[in-house]
Image (cartoon, rainbow, N blue to C red):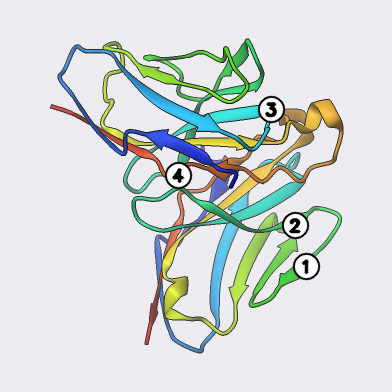
């Protein structure tokens, strides 16, 4: 049973527009959330994270929003650039699990010029 | 120039053979992890180690074995007991938060991956 769900396998966006990637989780013990970006045939790289004590964290063009009551988080990329085309993984972790993240299946983002 | 390396990048194995994937890090991280990625799947945890000479099974440990004799190294052996070994294998490392109580920031640093194909 998936504890972290990314229900959209793919997303296509035009350059300059906003990309919104969504993630839902079921385990209420999760208290730290991360986004990773992955290019083909490479390892994922950390992008941005958020603690459950916050509802928003921003880093340049990337903003993560957390809605604890809905067990939902989203990653906003504004403006989207062709170099953002990659697979984005949402991950969630909990102190009880030694903060080892549980990953979603990923969303493939394609940004068209 | 710190980082995490995996070798080889591509590996071919005949059915019934064991094979060992290398993972080395010079980030001075205590914790190391092995994940497997299949098409359309997320990263699934095989084994992890939070300290030298200790390791724990992840969600899909059957058919795999590991060792952690040195802090820098965490090799993964894919044994002939693994029913479907063809996959992309990723190694990662991180600061061990439980030991240093630094809070929840536990981003992992990943290696470039090894693609294993069983012929």
Whether pointer 2 and pointer 3 mark residues with C-beta atoms closer than 8 Å, the reply is no
- CA gap, disc 1 to disc 2? 7 Å
* Coordinates of residue B79 in the picture (x, y in percent): 32, 13
x, y percent for residue A37: 51, 58
Which circle, 3 or 1, is nearer the viewer?
3
Q: Position of residue B77 (x, y in %)?
A: 38, 17
Labels 2, 3: front one:
3
Proximity of marks 4 and 2: CB atoms separated by less than 8 Å:
no
Residue A19 higher or lower than B102, as above or below:
below
Label 3's element?
Answer: loop
Q: Is residue B102 above or below residue B51?
A: below
Spatial CA distance of label 1 from label 4 is 24 Å
Residue tagged by mark 3?
B30
| Circle 1 residues within 10 Å: few <14, some 14–19, many ≥20 | some
On screen, residue A13 above or below B118: below
Crowding around mark 4 (Cα neighbors within 10 Å: few <14, some 14 to 19, many 20+) is many
Q: How many marks?
A: 4
Do the residues at discs 1 and 4 belong to one chain?
A: no
Q: Chain of mark 2?
A: A
Distance from disc 4 to disc 3, alpha carbons, whole Å, reads 24 Å
Residue at the disc numbered 4? B42
According to the picture, the residue beneath numbered tag 1 turns out to be A56
The disc at residue A50 is: 2
Q: Earlier in the sequence, mark 1 or mark 2?
A: 2
Please, what secondary structure does the residue beneath circle 1 have? strand
């Amino acid at each position: 049973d998936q504890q972290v769900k990314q229900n959209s396998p793919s997303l296509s966006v035009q350059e300059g527009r906003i990309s919104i990637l969504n993630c839902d989780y079921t385990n209420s013990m999760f208290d730290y959330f991360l986004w990773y970006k992955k290019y083909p045939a490479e390892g994922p790289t950390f992008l941005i994270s958020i603690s459950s004590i916050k509802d928003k964290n921003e880093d340049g063009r990337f903003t993560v929003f957390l809605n604890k009551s809905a067990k939902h988080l989203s990653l906003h990329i504004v403006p989207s650039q062709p170099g953002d085309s990659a697979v984005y993984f949402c991950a969630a972790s909990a102190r009880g699990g030694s903060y080892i993240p549980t990953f979603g299946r990923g969303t493939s983002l394609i940004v068209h010029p | 120039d710190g980082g995490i390396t995996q070798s080889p990048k591509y590996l071919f194995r005949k059915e019934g053979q064991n094979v060992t994937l290398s993972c080395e890090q010079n980030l001075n991280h205590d914790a190391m992890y092995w994940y497997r990625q299949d098409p359309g799947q997320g990263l699934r945890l095989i084994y992890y180690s939070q300290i030298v000479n200790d390791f724990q099974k992840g969600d899909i440990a059957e058919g795999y074995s590991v060792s952690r004799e040195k802090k820098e190294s965490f090799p993964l052996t894919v044994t002939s007991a693994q029913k479907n070994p063809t996959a992309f294998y990723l190694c990662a490392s991180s600061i061990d938060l439980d030991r240093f109580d630094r809070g929840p920031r536990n981003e992992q640093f990943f290696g470039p991956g090894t693609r294993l194909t069983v012929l």
